[in-house]
Image (tube, rainbow, N blue to C red):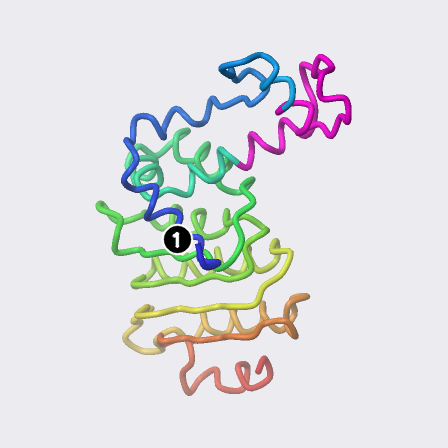
Amino acid sequence: DGGVARVTSLRESYFPTDLIRKSHTIKIELAEASRDSDRKHILNSIVRNKNLEADPPTTHPNYDAVNDAVKGAFAASLPILKAAAAAGGEEWTDTLDRLSKGIMTGTFEFYFNEFSPPLSLSQAREFVSHVPSTCNGLNIRHARGEAFECAIEGMIDCIGNANTMKRIICFDCKVGHWLKGGKDAGCQLATAIESSKHATSIEELALYTDLIVSGNVAEWASTL
């Protein structure tokens, strides 16, 4: 997938949504195989039991890890995210919880213009803040106004939770405050980056936004 999490999301957008939505019930330990010996081999491999012919345990932390990875991958698919956002409530929070436990790598991209109706302000922050900690980049695209400000708050949460952070991109995004633009949000992001453990590991910082304005040049100069 070239290290870009959204490629997986786009590929899975062609899957039947109803089937994807059932993915939250996946339990690898209860899965069936065409031959019981294959099932034993698979489950024993997951729990790292060298005796592949043994009866596999009914529960194991490695099962949970695999289940979380599969559920997280499906939760990142665009149809699931759009359906969960529209439904709101428990479906939204459950989807984000599964997303956060995924093990996707590379840059996670957010296309805010793909949500109709648009994400609420709280959803904008929650969405970005639940990126899996295994992702090492964020790319926010086409976010506007207060939703973009909330997305920045989510980015700050994500930066704090990430194992590694190498890329931060905001493309075609704008706070658009009539007087100060994105000054305050820009200050918050600059401060978060500078104070994070990733301050020296970030390889790309591209902000096609109004987050850098005359009123916060000093903060960004210090960060860079």
Q: Quadrant of the C terminus?
A: bottom right
Q: In this view, does 57 lie above or below 97?
A: above
**Relative to the observer, which residue lies in front, 18 or 192?**
18
- Residue 209 falls in which quadrant of the image? bottom left
Measured as percent of width and height from the top left, residue 145 is found at: 30, 63
Number of marks drawn: 1
Q: In this view, does 67 lie above or below 210?
A: above
**Relative to the observer, which residue lies in front, 219 or 58?**
58
Residue under the point 39% across and 35% down: 92
**Relative to the observer, which residue lies in front, 89 or 79?**
79
Q: Quadrant of the N terminus?
A: bottom left
Measured as percent of width and height from the top left, residue 82 is found at: 30, 41
Measured as percent of width and height from the top left, residue 125 is found at: 43, 52
Q: Does 210 sit left or right of 187 as displayed? A: left
Residue under circle 1? 6
Q: In the displayed orientation, state which residue is furthest to the left.
A: 116
Q: In the displayed orientation, state which residue is furthest to the right.
A: 50
- Residue 60 falls in which quadrant of the image? top right
Q: How crowded is mark 1: few (under 14 residues within 10 Å), some or many (20 or more)?
A: many
Residue under the point 65% across and 75% down: 200
Under tag 1, what secondary structure?
helix
Q: Is residue 153 above or below residue 39?
A: below
Query: Is residue 87 located in the magenta-colored stretch of the structure?
Result: no
**Relative to the observer, which residue lies in front, 140 or 46?**
46
Q: Does 16 sit left or right of 148 as displayed? A: left
Residue under the point 22% across and 45% down: 117
Q: Give the range drawn in magenta.
A: 42-69
Measured as percent of width and height from the top left, residue 129 is found at: 50, 51
